[in-house]
Amino acid sequence: MKTLPKLLLDNAATRGQRPALRQKALGIWQTWTWSEVAAQSREVAAGWLALGVGRGMPVAVLGRNRPRLYFAMLGAQAIGALPVPFYEDASADEIAPLMARLGITHAIAENQEQVDKLLLLRAQMPSLAHIVYTSARGLDAYPDAGLLPFERLVEGGRPRVAEVDAEIARGAPADVAIVLHTSGTTGEAKVVRLTHAALIHTASAIARLEGLGERDEVLAWLPLAWVKQHLSCFAQWQVCGYTINCPESADTVAADLRDIGPTFHVATPRSLEALLKQVTLRMEDASPFKRRLYRHFLAVAAHAGERVLVGEAVGLGERLQYALGRGLIYSPLKDALGVARIRVLHVAGEAVGSELFGYFRSLGVNLKAVYGSTESAGVVCVPRDRRSAADVVGRPIDGMEVRVEQGELCIRGPGLALGVADAAGWFRTGDAAVIDAAGEVRIIDRRADLLSVAGVQFAPREIENRLRFSQYIREAIVASDGHHSVVCVVNVDYDSLRDWADRKQYAFSGYRELVALAPVAGLVGEHIAEVNRALAATPELWRAQIRRFVILHKEFDADDQEMTRTQKLRRSHVMAKYASLFAALHRGDAEHRVEAAVRFDDGREGVVAATLAIHAAYVYEHAGELPAAAAAVPQPA
C-alpha cells in the first residue's frame, strides 16, 4: 500500500492533464490539473522544509476549502509533517488547548480572521514561530515577525525542492497522515491520529462499493476538520482521481452545487433539512394550483418512489403517475437543489430522520445513511443499493468487522486510528445498536443519551428528528424525568417562521419578539401534536409522547457551547445549562424565568434573560388512539 503523497505522484503521472481541483472566484471557476497540484504541493513542501518543519511535526490549518490550504496539507504530508485542520468558526479559546497539547510551532491561515486568532494565541504560546497566510487582504499593516504570505513560503523553499522527492520516498503507510479531533459532543474533544493506511483502505473500499472514478465531480464544502470531509475530498480524491470543487463562499454553496452538479456528494442531515425548508418556503409563495400539484406528486413519490429507485415492480398506473411527476416536479426540483446528477449521496455526522430520508429517496436520489466516526476514518458501514431505512446503516465495508457487546457497537479493522482499540483490536463506539440476521447494522442512539419513561427505554433522537422535519422547527431537545414526563425545548427556524409571520401580518422585531407571539406556540404545538400522533401509533413509544414544551428565547449556538462545530447538540451541556427550565417543564409550571450566558459575534460575553411560557402538548392517552388530526391538534390563531 502507498502513502497519500505517492498517490499524488501517481495521479500526476497517469492523469496529469485531467482537472483535479477547481475554485470559484469572482464567479469564474479556476482549474488546476493533477500535474499542477503535484507541482505546487512540491513547492510548498520545500517551503515548509525551509521554515524548519520536519517529519512528525504538526502544522495547524485554519480556513475553508481553498486550493492553497490543500497544497499546504499535501506539502506537509510530502515531508512527513502532520496537518492539523481546525474548524474555521472555532474561537481562539477553543483551539488553544489542542494547539498547546500538540505543541504546534507552524500554522497556515486563510485570511485576516484566522490570523487574528493565531496572533491571540501567540501571546500564550511563544512557540508558535511562523504563521503563513494565503490572502493578504487587511494584513498589510500587521507586524512582520513570523508572519509571512503564501508567496514567500513558496519562494523561500525553491532551493530545497529537490529534497522533496526523497522525503516522499521515505514515507510509509503506517505513518500518521492527519491529526483530527472529535466534535466534543459528549465532552472535551479528543485528538485522533489517522495513518495513510487507514485512510487509503477506507477510501478504496468506498470507491469499489460505489463505483467511484476519475470522472466523478465532488463539491468540497464541509469543514476541513471534519473526518468525512477529509475522507471524501482529500484521501478519496487521491485514491479515485476525481475532481473536487471549492465553493466561492459559504453563501454561494447552494448556487455552486447547482453549477457543478456533483455525481458523488456528502451531506449532513442539517444541510438536507435546510434544502428542504428552502423548497417549502418557495412553495408557500407559489400559486394554489402549483401547491396542489406539488403535494399530489409528493404523495405519488412517497408511495412509489422508493420502489422505482431500487428497481422493484410498480403497477402501470403508479409508473405512469411517477413518470409524469418526474417531468413536472421531481426533475426540476432536483435540478434546483443541485442533486440532479448525483449517483450516490452519503449523509453522515448524525442520524437522519425517517421523513427527511424518505423525501429524498422518493424523488429518486440515492441517499444512503452511512456510519462512522473520527476514530474509524469516517466510514465503517454503508448501505448497499437496495431498499433501506433511515436508521439502517448497512453492512461494514471490506476489511472492517462489527459486533454488539452489551448493546454497544464495537468495530475492528484496518480503518481504525492509532491507539483507540483494545488489546484484541476492538474499538467501543459508545453507540447503541443492533445487528440483524443479514448483518445489517441499525443505530439506535448514543448509549449515554437513551432515555426511559414508565420503565420503557427510547431514543430521544428519533423524536427530535421528527420534530425537526417541520419547516418551523430548527432544533429540539427531548428530556424525560424517567417516570411519566417527556418534555422538549424548541428552537424555531427563524427564516421560515418570519416568512409565515409576515404573511399573517404579525408585528415583531427580532427573534425574541417573534417566538413570544401566542400564535407561534400554536403553530409549534400543531406539529408536536402530529409527532405525538405518530408516536401513539407505535405501542412501544406511545408513553414517550411530549407532554409539555417551551420555545427558547435564543438559538442554540456553538459559540455558547450548546452545539458542536459540526452542528450537533451537546446534550449534556444543554441539559446542565437549562436544568431549572427542564425541572419546571416536568413540574408543569405555567412559566419560567431563564438567564442564559451568551457570547456575541464581537467576542463580548453577556446574559440574555426572559420569562418563557410553558405550553401543554396534545397527548393521545392510549396506544393506537388516532382521532382525526384536525380535531386533535390545537390550531394557531
Image (cartoon, helix red, strand yellow):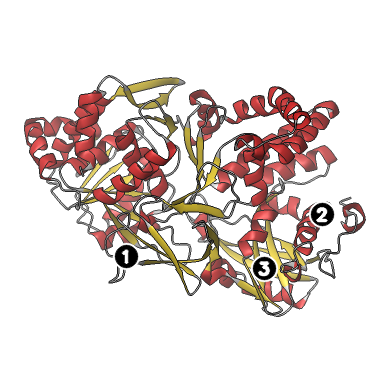
Q: Amino acid at mark 1?
A: Val
Tell me the element at label 2: helix
- Identity of the residue drawn at 62% across and 27% down: 336
Q: Residues within 10 Å of mark 2 (few under 14, many from 20)?
A: many
The label on residue 594 is 3
Q: Residues within 10 Å of mark 1 (few under 14, many from 20)?
A: some
Quarter-wise, where is residue 490 in the image?
bottom right
Q: Amino acid at mark 2?
A: Glu
Query: Does the residue at mark 3 contact the one at mark 2 (Cβ under 8 Å)?
Result: no
Residue 129 rendering spot, x and y as whole percentages: 19, 50
| Mark 3 or mark 2, earlier in chain | 2
CA–CA distance between discs 1 and 3?
40 Å
CA–CA distance between discs 1 and 2?
45 Å
| Mark 1 or mark 3, earlier in chain | 1
Q: Amino acid at mark 3?
A: Val
Instruction: Tell me if 162 is positioned left or right of 8 in this view.
Output: left
Q: Is residue 354 positioned above or below 136 on the image?
A: below
Residue sitting nearer the eye, 188 or 205:
205
Residue sitting nearer the eye, 506 or 56:
56
**In front: mark 1 or mark 3?**
1
Query: Does the residue at mark 1 contact the one at mark 2 (Cβ under 8 Å)?
Result: no
Q: Is residue 16 positioned above or below 559 on the image?
A: above
Quarter-wise, where is residue 164 in the image?
top left
- Identity of the residue drawn at 44% across and 62% down: 184
- Identity of the residue drawn at 31% across and 21% down: 18
Residue sitting nearer the eye, 607 or 417:
417
Tell me the element at label 3: strand
What residue is disc 2 on? Answer: 526
Q: Is residue 290 positioned above or below 272 on the image?
A: above
What residue is disc 1 on? Answer: 420
